[in-house]
Amino acid sequence: MEGMQGKTLLLTGSLVAALGLSGAVNAEELRLITWGGYAPDEVVAQFEKETGIDVKITLSNNEDMISKLRATGGAGFDLAQPSQDRIVGVQRQFNIYKPIDYSKINTDQLQPSMVKATQESTALNGKSYGVPSVWGTSGLIVHASVADTVTDYTDLCDPAVAGKVSYRLKRPTLIGFAFALGMDPFAAYSDRDEYQSIMAKVEGALIDCKDNVKTYWTGGDQLLSLLRTGEVTAAMAWDAGGWKLNAENADIRFVAPESGALGWIDTFAIPRRSENEEAAYQWINFVMQPEIAAKITNASGNFTASKGADEFVRAELRDAYRVSFNDDAINNIKWYPPVPPGLETMEGQVLDRVQAAN
């Protein structure tokens, strides 16, 4: 009897151990490489509770994502969040992503214009490699006293705001001025001569505008300080900075320019050797639910492609967003496409000449 009990206990212990090991092996896990604020703790906890899938977060940026996935041939992660203009060139060169199966995406809860823009900008050989997630724009931050004067990028050169203007000497300024001058720089990406012609006109406009510029800002804190003190009343900058200032001073707000804000989208992309593709699609559809997406906005300060999520965002951020963007302004956003080789060198030369001009 004693021997039988011992054998029974041994068998039971072995079975428990085997089941425990099996449970550990089969436990579902989603390995997500993403930006800070895009996977808040409360969102992760809710997803894990509702799905039983453990989420492992690695914080990163575009360069780091590319480096890690390139080193492994697209392994090590089940879902990544690169920017929309950092997918096609990388995919063409390194083959680290797999096409998105849009039949598994609940597009009814996404902004149609952002789905279209992302599908187009991440398209390669007839397949799309990204789903829109978090987005933001460059546009205008203006004080109420000059809001009627400064409604587009080139209005920063109006005599009414002379000496009270700031913007960066970076490519978004070149692109914004080009659109405000009635040209389409993105459409000229495939024609180097046409792009050179556009940049020459923008260069002239920026040189003529130099007397209006208080300073070319180089850091976000510097710009916010200039706007807080009133040294600058109109600037080209990011929407999140404008909304932050609006929370402090209702007379300062972010404005979507008449020619269109310049937009970036951080996407969802599935690495080529993902081990849990189904969990990746579950995460995408889960976090793009309006109430969940609002939690991401509250954590990151940036809005998402989730349709109607602004209803659930904290009140001061929601109200500032709605002042900046109605449906027409959203549909008029000029989304950054991938930059062809050589254009950034050309732009750098233009910016150098603007900087050096008297």
Image (cartoon, rainbow, N blue to C red):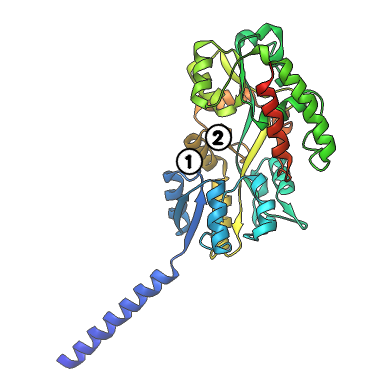
Please tell me whether residue 18 is drawn above or below residue 232 in the rendered image: below
Assess whether mark 1 and mark 2 are in contact (beta carbons under 8 angstroms): yes
- Is 88 placed left or right of 285 in the picture? right
- Residue type at mark 1 is Gly
Q: Position of residue 166 (x, y in %)?
A: 61, 18
Q: Is residue 103 visible?
A: no
Question: Looking at the image, which residue is at 81% across and 38% down?
Answer: 187
Query: Disc 2 and disc 1: Cα gap in Å?
Result: 9 Å
Q: Position of residue 269 (x, y in %)?
A: 61, 53
Q: Position of residue 250 (x, y in %)?
A: 53, 15
- Residue type at mark 2 is Asn
Question: Looking at the image, which residue is at 50% across and 36% down?
Answer: 300
Reading the image, the residue beneath label 2 is 302
Question: Looking at the image, which residue is at 60% across and 57% down?
Answer: 270
Q: Is residue 247 visible?
A: yes
Quadrant of the snapshot with the N terminus: bottom left
Q: Position of residue 66 (x, y in %)?
A: 57, 53
In what element is the residue under mark 1? loop
Residue farthest to the left, as pictured = 2
In what element is the residue under mark 2? loop
Please tell me whether residue 287 is drawn above or below residue 25 in the rendered image: above
Question: Which residue occupies the foreground of this view, 226 or 343?
Answer: 343
Question: Which residue occupies the foreground of this view, 48 or 357?
Answer: 357
- In primary-sequence order, the first of circles 2 and 1 is 1
Could you classify mark 1 by the number of other residues whose Cα lies within 10 Å: few (under 14), some (14-19), or many (20 or more)?
A: some
Reading the image, the residue beneath label 1 is 37
